[in-house]
Amino acid sequence: MTQRRITFLNGPNANLYGLDSKGTYGSESFPQIEARCRQHAESLGVSLDFRQSNHEGELIDWIQAARLDADGLLINGAGLTYTSIAILDALLSFEKPIIEVHMSNIYKREPFRHHSFISKAATGIVAGLGPLGYELAITAMVELLARADKAKADKA
Ligand code: DHK
């Protein structure tokens, strides 16, 4: 079996995690979170393409590229979660598992963060667990891919 490939995209301002004086997203910096995810993916034997952009179009280009390059997609759309039908449409074209991730519990926050356009395309959601949620989402994706492989093998 070839190594599974996972893409993890992060939206606007995620690069500032850990730098906010209110501590909304904890104290871990974005590079630290990225390093943690890379280590975790390596320990699970999957390859991880981890990216962040402040630009909607760039995120859409990466989602489209993932259609060819990735077996599963994880996305924290950050502020674009609540506004971007274009990101939703790109995600709907990705016909493999998608996990939506948020550092914070968005349902505990302002009402404008309570409706995610991304959720319609997501297989599942992880929110409110900080950087741990990033690792759990990677674990969940690996498990979803393994189960899909097993179901295919059982059918053959
Ligand atoms: C990250 C952001 O940047 C916010 O815009 C979202 C999300 C929440 C998070 O919890 O990861 O509202």
Image: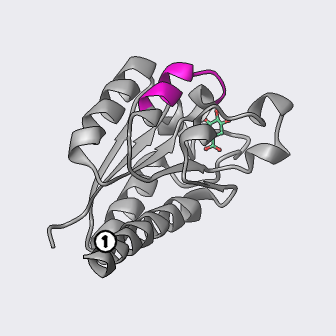
Query: In what element is the residue under mark 1?
Result: helix
Seen as rendered, the residue at the extreme front is 156
Q: Which residues are magenta?
A: 82-90
Point 63% across, 21% down: residue: 83
Q: Is residue 60 above or below residue 17?
A: above
Q: Is residue 99 left or right of residue 130?
A: left
Q: Is residue 86 above or below residue 10?
A: above
The residue drawn where x is 49% and y is 68% is 140
Disc 1 marks which amino acid?
A: Lys
Viewport quadrant of the N terminus: bottom left
Question: Is any atom of residue 12 visible in this view?
Answer: no
128 relative to 30, above or below: below
The residue shown at (55%, 43%) is 17
Q: Position of residue 62 (x, y in %)?
A: 31, 32
Q: How far across and down, in percent of the image, does residue 153 sit?
A: 27, 77
Name the outermost residue toward the bottom.
Answer: 154
The one nearer the camera, 146 or 49, is: 146
